[in-house]
Image (cartoon, rainbow, N blue to C red):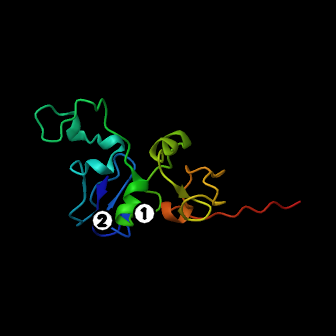
Amino acid sequence: PCHSSRGSHCQGGTWCCVTVGLCIPGDGESGVFVGSMKKDYYEGGCSPNSLIEGHDDYDPDCEQVGECHYPFILQDRNSRSSPFMMTPLPRAIMDRLMVGSNWNPAAQSRGTESGTGESEVSYSSPHRAALGFMSLMVIFWN
């Protein structure tokens, strides 16, 4: 997770996920840093500090730093990465991050599309606007 207060990295709030190496301040910018103290912003709660024996956040169950949990940050802080600051996650990672979620991307709400308790939509693709991606329409001409 990246902390950025001027909007160059994050939109809607000060915390967001960005591609590794992009959480750096621009010219004259301050308050930009990679946050390791927010365990809930990492998959499984495994922050960099979770791997350091003797640190208050040390967790022997963490074997590696977890993926930045941007669906949680979006829900918790209403914050997302600015365009082109975050590499889109592979579907397998999104599916892992969304385990246990009842977010319905088709309805943009919690619950199921049909109301039957079983949804046929994938929870691995939150609304593209929520991710900060640009919409693209492709038209094929004959």
Q: Residues within 10 Å of mark 1 (few under 14, many from 20)?
A: some
Instruction: Measuring from the top left, give residue 1's x and y in whole percent.
Output: 32, 52
Residue 123 position (above or below residue 79): above
**Quarter of image, res 73:** bottom left
Residue 94 position (above or below residue 9): above
Q: Which residue is mark 1?
A: 82
Q: Which residue is mark 2?
A: 14
Residue pictured at 55% horizontal, 43% vertical: 91
Q: Residue furthest right?
A: 142
Residue pictured at 20% horizontal, 40% vertical: 49
Could you tell which of marks 1 and 2 lies nearer the N-terminus? 2
Q: Residue furthest front?
A: 116
The tag on residue 62 is none
Horizontal arrangement in the rendering, residue 10 relative to residue 114 (left or right)? left
Mark 2: amino acid: Thr
Horizontal arrangement in the rendering, residue 54 relative to residue 25 (left or right)? left
Residue pictured at 36% horizontal, 64% vertical: 10
Foreground residue among 13 and 18: 13
Mark 1: amino acid: Ser
Q: Residues within 10 Å of mark 2 (few under 14, many from 20)?
A: many
Question: Element type at marker 2?
Answer: loop
Foreground residue among 89 and 54: 54
Residue pictured at 36% horizontal, 43% vertical: 43
Horizontal arrangement in the rendering, residue 64 relative to residue 89 (left or right)? left
